[in-house]
Amino acid sequence: MIAELSAAMAAIRETAQLAKLINDAKTEAEVNAAVNELNSKLSSIQCECVSLVELVGTYQEMNTSLKAKIAEFENFKVQAVDYSLNKVDSGTLVYSKNIVLSDGETAVNACPHCFHQNKISILQPDSVTGFGGFYVHFCPECKNKFRMNRVPPSKSRNISHHVV
Ligand SMILES: [Zn+2]
């Protein structure tokens, strides 16, 4: 049992015993002593109740936060179901799934860093392309950059190779 609850229950029990003591008291001095003790116990019960109310508030906040985390995780599980780990040309590992767009099927790549934090963040082409011969994509969520598939050799480069 929660310590604060045990303390409150004990104080209530002792208060009930004091009430019986007042009933059984033979002299005014005994009654006064028991009433003083009773008042002290009632104050203690009041303090314990305040602690319990605070504790319930804390538990309610934790409960709300945990429910939100569970909902977030459940939502991630639904979204993540079709993704699988995939190695692109550069050797980078990303989570990918195929989707059908109006112009055909395409692979959607999700950031592996965010994926491991139960977030699906779809990688987007970076303004810098062709870094080290690979396309560069970035994660809109964590801003990491990833070297992706190989940039195909351009026609002008092919021509220059033929000339040389
Ligand atoms: Zn990310």
Image (spheres, rainbow, N blue to C red):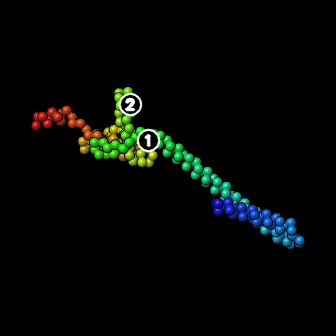
Q: Which mark is residue 110?
A: none
- Of label 2 and label 1, which has the lower sequence position? 1
Mark 2 element type: strand
Dot 2, crowdedness within 10 Å: few (<14), some or many (≥20)?
Answer: few
Q: Position of residue 77 (x, y in %)?
A: 47, 42
Q: Quadrant of the N terminus?
A: bottom right
Dot 1, crowdedness within 10 Å: few (<14), some or many (≥20)?
Answer: some
Compare residues 125 and 88 and report the one nearer the observer. 88
| Res. 17 in view | yes
Q: Position of residue 119 (x, y in %)?
A: 44, 44
Q: Position of residue 67 (x, y in %)?
A: 56, 47
Q: Amino acid at mark 1?
A: Ala
| Res. 130 in view | no
Mark 1 element type: helix
Q: Residue at x 30, y 42 (%)?
A: 88
The residue wearing badge 1 is 80
Asked if 32 appears above or below 101 in the picture, the reply is below
Q: Is residue 109 left or right of residue 46?
A: left
Mark 2 vs mark 1, CA separation in Å: 17 Å
The residue wearing badge 2 is 100
Q: Is residue 54 left or right of residue 140?
A: right
Compare residues 26 and 98 and report the one nearer the observer. 98
Q: Residue at x 14, y 35 (%)?
A: 160
Q: Is residue 14 left or right of residue 140?
A: right
Q: Is residue 148 left or right of residue 158?
A: right
Q: Amino acid at mark 2?
A: Val
Q: Residue at x 82, y 64 (%)?
A: 19
Q: Residue at x 41, y 41 (%)?
A: 121
Asked if 62 appears above or below 43 in the picture, the reply is above
Q: Position of residue 59 (x, y in %)?
A: 61, 53
Q: Quadrant of the C terminus?
A: top left
